Image: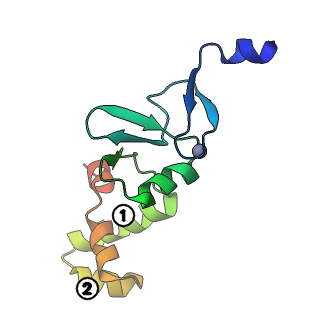
Amino acid sequence: MKRQAETEHWTQRKCPVCGKIFYLQDVTLWVYKMRIQHTSTVYFCSWRCLRAEETAGNPHMKSIKRPRVYSPEYLADSRRAVEMRQKGMTYRQIADTMGIKLDKAYKLANMREVNANDG
Ligand SMILES: [Zn+2]
């Protein structure tokens, strides 16, 4: 009985992949979801089921962009790359200096989050 009270304000969903019934407290905060064209949103019980649907390649499904969370190490690397770029180094030089691939150097040096923080 107590269990029912705890979940009464939660939204019940059924995972379309594994059929598991699960509860969402706030559907807008739920990250394991996909949009079917522009009509409706599908909710998955877990990352595993979301990925299963993604790799199934249903063309009507569009992943909903999840905000990226960067690790402090990644942000520190990015700040270094941005600084080197500001000193006029090429992406190739940045890549060589940091011992990373060229495309990663490009990504790090152009990270919007870091550039925005530097004003
Ligand atoms: Zn599932």
Rounded to the nearest angstrom, the CA distance separating label 2 from label 1 is: 16 Å
The image shows residue 72 at horizontal and vertical percentages of 50, 58
Residue ID at (60%, 40%): 19
The answer to which of 6 and 101 lies nearer the viewer is: 6
Q: In which quarter of the image is residue 86?
A: bottom left
> Secondary structure under badge 1?
helix
Q: In this view, does 18 lie above or below 7?
A: below
Identify the amino acid type marked 2. Answer: Arg
Q: Residue 66 carries which label?
A: none
Mark 1 highlights which residue?
79
Residue ID at (43%, 37%): 42
The answer to which of 6 and 67 lies nearer the viewer is: 6
Residue ID at (27%, 40%): 37
The answer to which of 23 and 71 lies nearer the viewer is: 23
> In terms of image quarters, where does ligand 1 lie?
top right
Q: Which of marks 2 and 1 is in front?
A: 2
